[in-house]
Image (cartoon, rainbow, N blue to C red):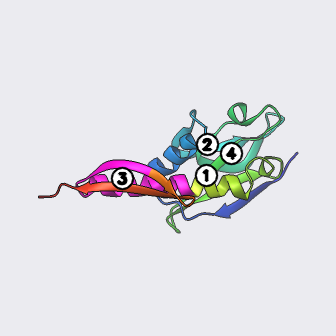
Amino acid sequence: MSAYHSQKTSYKDRDCLVAALKAQGYHDVEVHDVAQSLIGYHADMRNQKANVIVRRSNVGSASNDLGWEWDAKAGVFIEHISDYDKGKHNSAWLTGLKCHYSEAVDMKTAKRNGFIFLGRKIVNGKVQLKFQDNRR
């Protein structure tokens, strides 16, 4: 049985987290208002619970569920990823998730403030988003 490691994230927006997971290739993401138990490799219910879940069937045949649990006191999500799944979901994968999350937050904020998205490009390895201000 692979132990879960839990880590506080900077993710505050559930919709943007889901969008980031989808951008990372996980299109079947569960969202729950009440945290649900994560399931381990042997189909065992684990002590960790999560509000945003990528079930192990979508991760890999020998994997555990991936989960992000809402911490209302801190106002952020706590990430639950097992030792085994840290092989695939390593620092590079987590950096990609964080980049996609930041992009989703920027898109949501810009739209809310009346900006129109014009395009996305990568310059020197960094993503640049271009918007038009239509607040007149």
Element under disc 1:
strand
Question: Where 8 falls versus 112 (above or below)?
Answer: below
Element marked by disc 2: strand
**Nearer-N-terminus badge (3/4):** 4
Secondary structure under the numbered disc 4 in the rendered image: strand
Q: Position of residue 104 (x, y in %)?
A: 44, 52
Drawn side of residue 82 relative to residue 126, left or right: right
**Disc number at residue 68?**
1
Contact, CB < 8 Å: mark 2 with mark 1?
yes
What's the amino acid at mark 3?
Lys
> How many angstroms separate mark 2 from mark 1 (CA)?
7 Å
Residue at which label 3 appears: 108
Q: Secondary structure at mark 3?
A: helix
Instruction: Reply yes or no: does residue 100 show up in magenta.
Output: yes
Q: CA distance from mark 3 to mark 4?
A: 25 Å
Q: Disc 4 or 2, which lies upstream in sequence? A: 2
Query: Circles 4 and 1: CB distance less than 8 Å?
Result: yes
